Amino acid sequence: MTQEIEITVDNGVQIIRLVRAEKKNALTGPMYDAMSAALDGAERSDAIAAHVFLGSGGVFTAGNDITDFARRAQDGSQHAAPSQLFIARLPKVTRPMIAAVDGLAVGIGVTLLLHCDLVYATPTASFRAPFVDLGLIQEAGSSLLGPARLGYARAFELLALGEVWTADRAAQAGLINAVVTEGELEAKALAAARRLAAKPRAALLAARRMLKGDPALASKAIADELAVYKDLIRSPEAREAFTAFLEKRAPDFAKARGSAA
């Protein structure tokens, strides 16, 4: 396990906190493994009724650690990454999931929210899904869940155009439930989780299951996205995007396309 994910359980609520603030809580393989283990363990425990995802240091998460992404773009690895295994679990989670977002929410920091049942954010939170800018495709079933939750036009704005959303825009679009002050954020999320944990368990899980619909649909969307991702991550444009990021320069996608001709 890793010390960069802190797992605690309090009054039926499992708190999953990202504690890599010096790297803006960018997620590494061991961090994904720790979160997967926490979700799996809760499914086998009657003591846990809900999950709360928290960041630290004024940041939710900057998304995947770019070094891992760049390595996979270079070597074209076909092995399932910890991030992929974590994402595959999300539709199978039966307990309610709540997120408290402060500061940056990038990539998985956005698509994870589409699986959450309640999301709260501070006024300084910002949301960005730069998948296409990296030569890739949206993830975590967001090609299905995004239009369903946000409407097609807003989902396209967020996931394809890559527009940066403020907390107010995210609330207006339906990505988050409410904007609260920084001082209230964690208390708000934990209070909601504890209210859920105090409800009749069978009724709570049944209500969530019926509201969510068939999890197989989200799982299929995740698998379909992954199939496209595996092709795109080996593309010249993706390689150029990651190389440019690491070299701190603007990418030249026209040159990358030309080199593949």
Image (tube, helix red, strand yellow):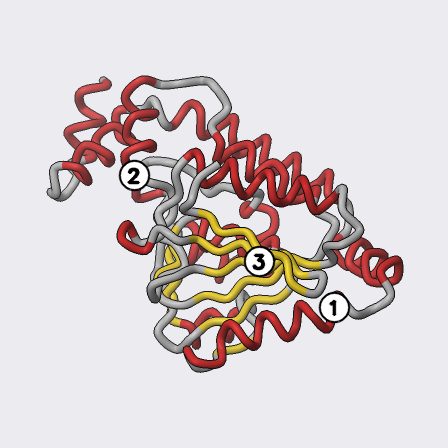
The label number, if any, that marks residue 15 in the structure image: 3
Image location (x, y in percent) of residue 189: 58, 71
Quadrant of the rendered structure where residue 135 is?
Answer: top left
Quadrant of the rendered structure where residue 95 is?
Answer: bottom right
Query: Circle 2 — which element?
Result: helix
Which amino acid type is shown beneath numbered disc 2?
Answer: Ile
Mark 1 neighbour class, 10 Å CA radius: few under 14, some 14 to 19, many 20 or more: some
Which amino acid type is shown beneath numbered disc 1?
Answer: Leu
Q: Residue at x 41, y 49 (%)?
A: 107
User: Closest to the observer: 253 or 94?
Assistant: 94
CA gap, disc 2 and disc 1: 36 Å
Nearer-N-terminus badge (3/2): 3
**Residue that label 1 marks:** 196
Which amino acid type is shown beneath numbered disc 3?
Answer: Ile
Query: Circle 1 — which element?
Result: helix
CB contact under 8 Å: marks 2 and 1: no
Nearer-N-terminus badge (1/3): 3
How many labels were placed on the picture? 3
Query: Circle 3 — which element?
Result: strand
Image location (x, y in percent) of residue 215: 73, 43
Image location (x, y in percent) of residue 150: 56, 62
Q: Residue at x 63, y 57 (%)?
A: 9
Q: Is residue 29 left or right of residue 236?
A: right
Please determine whether, in this image, residue 218 is positioned above or below residue 237: below
User: Closest to the observer: 176 or 11?
Assistant: 11
**Residue that label 2 marks:** 66
Image location (x, y in percent) of residue 2: 44, 39
Please determine whether, in this image, residue 12 is positioned above or below residue 85: below
Quadrant where the C terminus sits is top left
User: Closest to the observer: 65 or 214?
Assistant: 65
CA gap, disc 3 and disc 2: 25 Å
Q: Residue at x 23, y 36 (%)?
A: 241
